[in-house]
Image: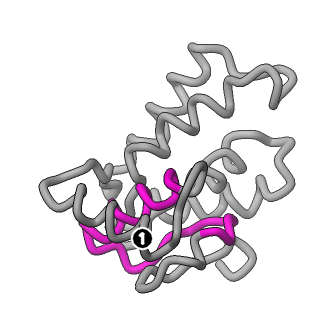
Amino acid sequence: MIAVDTNVLVYAHREESPKHEAALARLTKLAESPEVWAIPVFCLGELARVISHPRLFDPPHTPRETAEALRRLTGSPSLRILAPGPRYPELLSQAIEEGEAKGNLVYDAQIVALCREYGARALLTEDRDFDRFRGLATERLAAA
């Protein structure tokens, strides 16, 4: 199972993003495949925050557009939303220590902990900060 990070989701939802076409093509392929793929629950909230942020996009998505984007994204029958389970607190602690995560990098540790809890083999991301965490392969759009 591959999990998808927020930046790839944003690129797929905003046409002006530099990697829009690659991200949209990869998400479409995942969504239409019978193979299970995943989105960490935290990434859904961050996607909504980013695509609707008036300082990041002009114009930003409206609340209605943001909600519709989330509905379309989560409509894939092969998608699993990764939410914290009983092992999450310990996995988060391990990821924080291992990645020496502090400040904004703690958010990345949360994503890593969810991926580990659910056995994701890789994370599709353009964020190189994830390379600091062992045992979770990262895939980039260019390689996809």
Q: Is residue 122 within the magenta segment?
A: yes
Residue tagged by mark 1? 97
| Residue 74 sits above or below residue 138 on the image | above
Looking at the image, residue 66 sits to the left or right of residue 35; the answer is: right
Q: Is residue 56 within the magenta segment?
A: no
In-front residue for pair 90/21: 90
Task: Mark yes or no: residue 32 visible.
Answer: no
| Residue 139 found in image quarter | bottom right
| Residue 13 found in image quarter | top right
Q: Residue at x 65, y 53 (%)?
A: 7
| Residue 61 sits above or below residue 14 on the image | above
Q: Residue at x 38, y 80 (%)?
A: 121
Q: Secondary structure at mark 1?
A: helix
Tell me the kind of residue under disc 1: Glu
In-front residue for pair 48/135: 135
Q: Main secondary structure of the magenta part?
A: helix
Looking at the image, residue 62 sits to the left or right of residue 110; the answer is: right
Image color mode: one colour
Q: How many marks?
A: 1
Looking at the image, residue 23 sits to the left or right of residue 89; the answer is: right
Task: Mark yes or no: residue 75 visible.
Answer: yes
Q: Position of residue 107 (x, y in %)?
A: 50, 51
Q: Position of residue 113 (x, y in %)?
A: 35, 63
| Residue 61 found in image quarter | top right
Q: Position of residue 60 (x, y in %)?
A: 76, 22
Magenta span of residues: 106-129
Q: Residue at x 48, y 34 (%)?
A: 45
- Disc 1 crowd, CA 10 A, few/some/many (<14, 14-19, 20+): some
Q: Residue at x 69, y 66 (%)?
A: 126
Q: Position of residue 97 (x, y in %)?
A: 42, 70
Furthest toward the left, the residue is 86
